[in-house]
């Protein structure tokens, strides 16, 4: 590792870094900063929490000046990360005559236009909102010296590829580009080949993709038992700050409501919430007013919160990089963390893919029973009672205690009080009543020999239709489907025009009382 004094930084930057309490660089900083200071393009593979914001901010703070034009652009996938990165840049540049602005969706664009009129040198933006400003001509990129793509893999996952390409195409060719990503997908390499000039790859070793200080465990559990397991783990571990990840917005809402019903201080976070609501939830979590944050992957990107001791994957993520990002919320700044993952039996192939990608095996852990949780709570209560006695915090209840002991005996009286304090029976009853809506199974890739065939079809077997329903009438030209109300279902291949031409049909004779006749299948009116 390098000391920041060894990087020959401007005095103002070095002073700000030291004010933040940093003296030595992290692995990604020690590799990326020296290369970037030479003016070369850089691709860095690193997840959140490794110090990558400083890894790209320090180099551009070293090269830009106080001219009132936009000289640096940082693109981020989410508004939370956008806000977080801009705050970090503000700390690093506090002794420099520079201005930075965060530009993201969900905030009034008129307010952002007002901030942009102050002529900032640095803009941190989400792709969609930046495109809005570019179309309005409220942001001009003519004088850019550096472009940074932060969490590029997540921007691609969110469908921002076209926006990113449009933005980079609008930037001056003579610029420096830095790109950071937790994973190196082919699409990332394609962007690098198209928009970067001989970039140097700063790759975190594969075994470091997940921080060694994070203990990773998994539980084999059925969908119907997940919530019960979650509550037991929360009772046993008693985390001060924990993040729980669900796969969908509906899951986050249901899980948050269920946790609140049984007495946990929890709030949910996902993309459908207003920015004001999201800010309120995050402030509560940062300030310790709530101890549990339930979130989707996208909403949690870029959340830099110290003190998160536990990450619980209530639903296994579809993508490996989502797993890396999730557990990166804990084990930050050299602290230990615990990542607990719930795995349904049908999801073991996905778990194996994750383990292969991070080059690390998760530890299978035995499911805790209700008795395990109860015994753990009893030990905690014993500790609290002893602490209260030692503090002398029992004087107000001595008379009541004497009355209870005389009537019921000391052991029964104390046991009853502890049972009331624990509240285990009532809580277990409420937990068992809660039923969450089951999530859809994770997508499984079809094997090549079944590709192109419908569900339930058999390759090369003419008795089976592509929709998985067996024919009932051989080659009679129709099938009988009870699910469609008993109506006949005709198929084009068995009902060809050439075999049933209207012109070959015999003329029908209209009723004698009418003046109309039917010839050759066509209705005509006689003169």
Image (tube, rainbow, N blue to C red):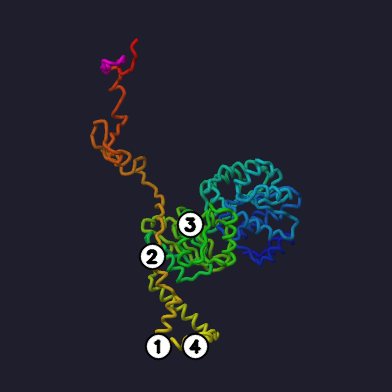
Which quadrant: the C terminus?
Answer: top left
Q: Are marks 4 and 2 in contact (CB under 8 Å)?
A: no
The earlier-in-sequence mark between 4 and 2 is 4
The earlier-in-sequence mark between 1 and 2 is 1
Q: Distance between the residues labelled 2 and 3?
A: 19 Å
Quarter of the view holding residue 166: top right
Q: Tell me the number on the disc at residue 78.
A: none
The earlier-in-sequence mark between 3 and 4 is 3
Q: Is residue 53 visible?
A: yes
Secondary structure under tag 2 reads: helix
Residue located at (67% from left, 41% from top): 136
Of the residues tagged 1 and 2, which is closer to the observer?
A: 1
**Pointer 1: what residue?**
409
Q: How far apart are marks 4 and 2 (CA)?
A: 39 Å
Q: Tell me the number on the disc at residue 399.
A: 4
Q: Tell me the number on the disc at residue 253.
A: 3
Q: Distance between the residues labelled 1 and 3?
A: 47 Å
Does the magenta-highlighted stretch encompass residue 85? no
Q: What stretch is highlighted in magenta?
A: 505-517
Residue 25 placement, left or right of 326: right
Secondary structure under tag 3 reads: helix
Secondary structure under tag 1 reads: loop
Residue 220, percent from left and from top: 38, 62
Quarter of the view holding residue 356: bottom left
**Pointer 2: what residue?**
432
């Amino acid at each position: 590792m390098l000391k920041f004094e060894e990087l020959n930084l401007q005095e103002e930057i070095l002073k700000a870094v030291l004010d933040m309490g940093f003296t030595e660089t992290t692995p990604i900083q020690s590799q990326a900063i020296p290369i970037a200071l030479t003016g070369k393009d850089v691709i860095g593979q690193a997840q959140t929490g490794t110090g990558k914001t400083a890894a790209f901010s320090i180099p551009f703070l070293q090269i830009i000046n106080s001219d009132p034009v936009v000289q640096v652009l940082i693109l981020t996938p989410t508004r939370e990360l956008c806000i977080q990165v801009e705050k970090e840049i503000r700390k690093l540049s506090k002794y420099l005559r520079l201005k930075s602005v965060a530009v993201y969706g969900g905030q009034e664009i008129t307010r952002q236009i007002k901030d942009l009129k102050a002529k900032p040198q640095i803009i941190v933006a989400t792709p969609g909102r930046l495109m809005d400003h570019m179309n309005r001509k409220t942001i001009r990129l003519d004088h850019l010296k550096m472009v940074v793509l932060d969490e590029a893999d997540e921007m691609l996952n969110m469908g921002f590829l076209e926006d990113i390409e449009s933005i980079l195409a609008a930037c001056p060719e003579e610029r420096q580009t830095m790109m950071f990503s937790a994973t190196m997908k082919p699409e990332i390499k394609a962007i690098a080949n198209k928009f970067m000039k001989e970039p140097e790859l700063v790759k975190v070793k594969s075994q470091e993709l997940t921080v060694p200080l994070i203990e990773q465990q998994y539980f084999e559990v059925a969908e119907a038992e997940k919530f019960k397991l979650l509550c037991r783990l929360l009772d046993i571990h008693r985390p001060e700050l924990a993040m729980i990840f669900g796969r969908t917005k509906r899951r986050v809402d249901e899980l948050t409501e269920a946790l609140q019903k049984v007495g946990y201080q929890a709030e949910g976070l996902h993309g459908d919430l207003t920015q004001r609501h999201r800010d309120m939830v995050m402030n509560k979590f940062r300030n310790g007013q709530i101890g549990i944050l339930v979130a989707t992957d996208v909403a949690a990107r870029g959340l830099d919160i110290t003190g998160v001791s536990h990450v619980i994957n209530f639903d296994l993520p579809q993508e490996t990089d989502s797993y890396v990002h999730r557990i990166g919320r804990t084990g930050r700044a050299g602290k230990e963390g615990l990542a607990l993952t719930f795995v349904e039996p049908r999801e073991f192939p996905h778990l194996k893919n994750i383990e292969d990608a991070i080059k690390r095996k998760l530890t299978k852990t035995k499911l805790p029973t209700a008795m395990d949780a109860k015994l753990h709570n009893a030990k905690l209560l014993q500790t609290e009672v002893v602490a209260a006695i030692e503090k002398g915090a029992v004087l107000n209840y001595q008379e009541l205690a004497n009355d209870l002991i005389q009537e019921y005996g000391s052991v029964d009286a104390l046991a009853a009080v502890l049972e009331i304090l624990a509240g285990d029976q009532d809580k277990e009853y409420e937990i068992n009543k809660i039923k969450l809506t089951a999530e859809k199974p994770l997508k499984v890739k079809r094997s090549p020999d079944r590709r192109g065939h419908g569900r339930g079809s058999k390759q090369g077997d003419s008795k089976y239709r592509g929709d998985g329903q067996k024919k009932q009438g051989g080659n009679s030209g129709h099938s009988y489907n009870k699910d469609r109300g008993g109506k006949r279902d005709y198929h084009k291949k068995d009902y060809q025009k050439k075999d049933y031409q209207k012109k070959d049909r015999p003329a029908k004779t209209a009723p004698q009382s009418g003046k109309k006749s039917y010839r050759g299948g066509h209705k005509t009116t006689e003169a």
